[in-house]
Amino acid sequence: MGDLKKWVNKKWVDIGAPKKNGKYQPCGRKSASGSKRKYPKCVPLAKATRMTKGEKASAVSRKRAAGNPGGK
């Protein structure tokens, strides 16, 4: 159970929607239908800072191509 708690407590950010100042927006969006933001690709902040620009672009494109595989 401790590992799950660590996983949840990490700061998750959306690498698909970087801000102009180089920082990241928090993961998620309020509503898929009312949002102008595209499908989010979320990773822990520590991983996002280690990824290259190409790795981020590749991860985001794979996520958006897959869409939402899960149902409600």
Image (spheres, rainbow, N blue to C red):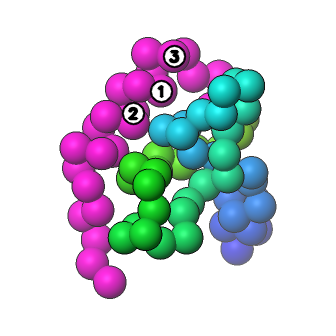
How far from the left and from the top, in percent, is residue 62? 29, 38
Marks 3/1 in contact by CB < 8 Å: the verdict is yes
Q: Quadrant of residue 8?
A: bottom right
Residue 56 screen position, x and y as percent: 47, 27
Q: Position of residue 72 (x, y in %)?
A: 32, 84
Q: Residues within 10 Å of mark 1 (few under 14, many from 20)?
A: some
**Residue at (54% x, 16% y) in the render:** 52
Q: Which residue is mark 1?
A: 56
Residue 6 part of the magenta-drawn span: no
Q: CA distance from mark 2 to mark 1?
A: 5 Å
- Left of 40 or right of it: where is 21? right
Q: Secondary structure at mark 3?
A: helix
- Residue at x-position 66% and y-position 46%: 25
First reached walking from the N terminus: tag 3 or tag 2:
3
Left or right, residue 23 beside residue 71:
right
Q: Nearer the viewer, residue 38 or 66?
A: 38
Quadrant location of residue 9?
bottom right
For the point 29% across and 62% down, the residue is: 68
| Magenta part of the chain | 48-72
Q: Which residue is mark 2?
A: 59
Marks 3 and 1, how far apart at CA: 5 Å
- Dot 1 falls on a residue whose secondary structure is helix
Amino acid tagged 1: Lys
- Looking at the figure, which quarter contains the N terminus? bottom right
Q: Secondary structure at mark 2?
A: helix
**Contact check, label 2 and label 1, Cβ < 8 Å:** yes
- Tell me, yes or no, whether the highlighted magenta stretch contains residue 67: yes
Q: Which residue is mark 3?
A: 53
Look at the magenta stretch and give its main secondary structure: helix
